[in-house]
Image (tube, grey):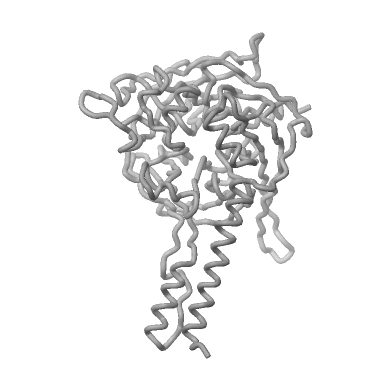
Amino acid sequence: MPSIGTTLYLALVVAWGASFYQWYVNDFFAVTLGIGRVIQTIDEFPYTCRRIEHPRLEACEDIWLDNEAKTLYAACAGTEGRLQWSPAMKHLNATGRRPGGSELIALDIDYPGADGLYNLRAIKPAGYNGATGDESLDFVGFDAQILDGDTIRFYLINLRPPVGAFNNIIDATKLGANATIEVFETRRGEDQMRHLRTVWSPAVWSPNRVAAVGGGAFFVTNDHSGKIGWRRELDDFIGGGNVAYCDGNGECHAAFNGDEEDEDLPQASMNEPKYKALVNRALKLIPKTKLKFPNGLTRGFDGLIYVPSSVDGQIRVFSINDDNTLKQLDTIHVRMPLDNVSPDAKGDLYVPGFPSGIQSAKGLANPYEEISPVSIWRIRKTVDLGPDGVRSVDYRVEKVIEDRDAKVLSGATTIRHDVKTGRLFISAAVHPFLAVCEPR
């Protein structure tokens, strides 16, 4: 008959094996890859959608809507440039970037014009000296705050290429991007934004998106465990990346790493030291909670931080501690890889999903010839007070649009909802267009 120590150890190994199957194998195929998922066509939904196509509206990873001025801002890098230089997707040919770099484009959403381009114009940077000695920027995700009636402050992820002597670009496959967050200000109606400061920190190594929280401070996701290297290759399976916090002076620290401490794990209460060592060793094999490709976070109107995952299909909900670290409160299970999550003027959250992981990967690698199916989700938070005085929070997840065949939408990464008209503005990290969907 096996001893109690051996029995406990074997039980833990079985538990670990079951956890591994559920968390890694089953979820990877069902959630991440979407095998067996039924995907609907865009004609099944009550929207009329069209593409907004222009060379300056290519590869607009992120967009932000000024709800009051009805102006949409898009961070665009050019499709060919993005296919060469996109560190998050391991495209590290910095010399292939679009000449002149990225642009911040403004669109007046209530005035499409005869050409359907919404008075397209660039917001040009002033007072910024780029990594290579020019004014070029390399945008990914960003956030903005309205400081007063007319002043807007932008927090822009800038994936600068690494440079050496005389500002010459050097091999990024050995170093990765030299990422910063650039802070600019503009006034409504202006076509120029003034550079205020550059934030660089070892705590921010692979930034994806910023969530501004006031006073010049912000949270930012590091979407991988490192810039380059073998450990990064395992992130989709065992997790990696974190959320960092930077204060108004540019000092940054980790806010949430996604790791449980060893002392939080259950401990064996046994007299025999040799068995206790074996049991504790097995306990440490149980998978810990880790972020898997934490993507475009946001600060909700409730003051909470929402962090979506591009692997496990979850949005983790955090409160902010007094020391500006994060405490996880809830998990919203969408069960589909997700990109940037964005609140509308009512506080509802909109987030794009990738219903077919295999086809999405093909579309991101070759957006001209391969399709990348899209799902758009709305998440509505409800707070109820029960008869016993207990407060309950619920998140209603609803599919708004899906485009199985990428008939109009393809590779979407950000959704902005205009509450006044019900229109959806949709951008894509790689694809050469924006899209707008009008409710029928």
Q: Residue 170, percent across and down? A: 28, 29
Residue 135: name its quadrant.
top left
Q: Residue 283, percent across and down? A: 46, 71
Residue 77 visible in the current orientation: yes
Residue that extends furthest to the bottom in the rendered view of this protein:
1
Relative to residue 347, is residue 97 depicted above or below?
Answer: above
Rendered residue at 46%/21% (across/down): 103
**In the image: residue 55, left or right of residue 281:** right
Relative to residue 267, is residue 380 depicted above or below?
Answer: above
Task: Count every numbered label the image shows and give the total.
Answer: 0
Q: Residue 68, percent across and down? A: 60, 26
Residue 199 visible in the current orientation: no
Of the 4 image quadrants, the one containing the C terminus is top right
Query: 351 or 212: which is nearer to us?
Result: 351
Rendered residue at 49%/46% (across/down): 293
Relative to residue 113, is residue 349 depicted above or below?
Answer: below
